Image (spheres, rainbow, N blue to C red):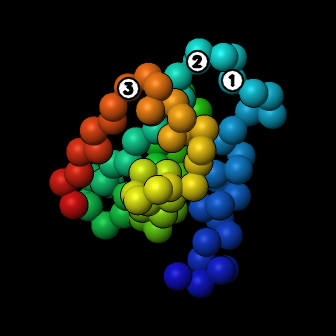
Amino acid sequence: MSAQALEEPLTVLRSIFPSKRLNKGTPLVVYSQPSKDGTIRSLVFEGLGQVDSTWVSKELFKAYFVGEGNSPTVERFLDDNCSIKILTKY
């Protein structure tokens, strides 16, 4: 995917997050869902907005949950507090 094609979805992704931090203990619910016609996946941040980009959706989930991931904070949280199940149809 070209950098130009990613510009809009990444701008939308940056604009979704509020300028302040979420309160401690506030869950951030993120999920990926297919569009009605099945041609694109949306990355949904419940209550904040969504990014309509299959590439952004896949890459965010891969970065955090495949292999060792790139987020020590997420890794520590999951180790100490819960297990996670990733359900995928695709």
Question: Left or right: 17 with respect to 86?
Answer: right
Quadrant in the picture for residue 72: top right
Mark 3 crowd level (few <14, some 14–19, many ≥20, 10 Å Cα): few
Q: Are marks 2 and 1 in contact (CB under 8 Å)?
A: yes
Question: Left or right: 6 with respect to 81?
Answer: right
Question: Can you see residue 46?
Answer: no
Q: Which residue is mark 3?
A: 82
Q: Which residue is mark 2?
A: 26
Q: Which residue is mark 1?
A: 22
Mark 1 crowd level (few <14, some 14–19, many ≥20, 10 Å Cα): few
Residue furthest toward the right? 19
The amino acid sitting under disc 3 is: Cys
- Residue at horizontal 51%, vertical 30%? 77
* Dot 2 or dot 3, earlier in sequence: 2
Assign a secondary structure to mark 3: loop
What is the CA distance from the residue labelled 2 to the residue labelled 3?
A: 16 Å
The amino acid sitting under disc 2 is: Thr
- Residue at horizontal 31%, vertical 67%? 39
The amino acid sitting under disc 1 is: Leu
Assign a secondary structure to mark 2: loop
Assign a secondary structure to mark 1: loop
What is the CA distance from the residue labelled 2 to the residue labelled 1?
A: 6 Å
Name the one closer to the observer, 27 or 76. 76
* x and y, in percent, of residue 90 in the image: 21, 61
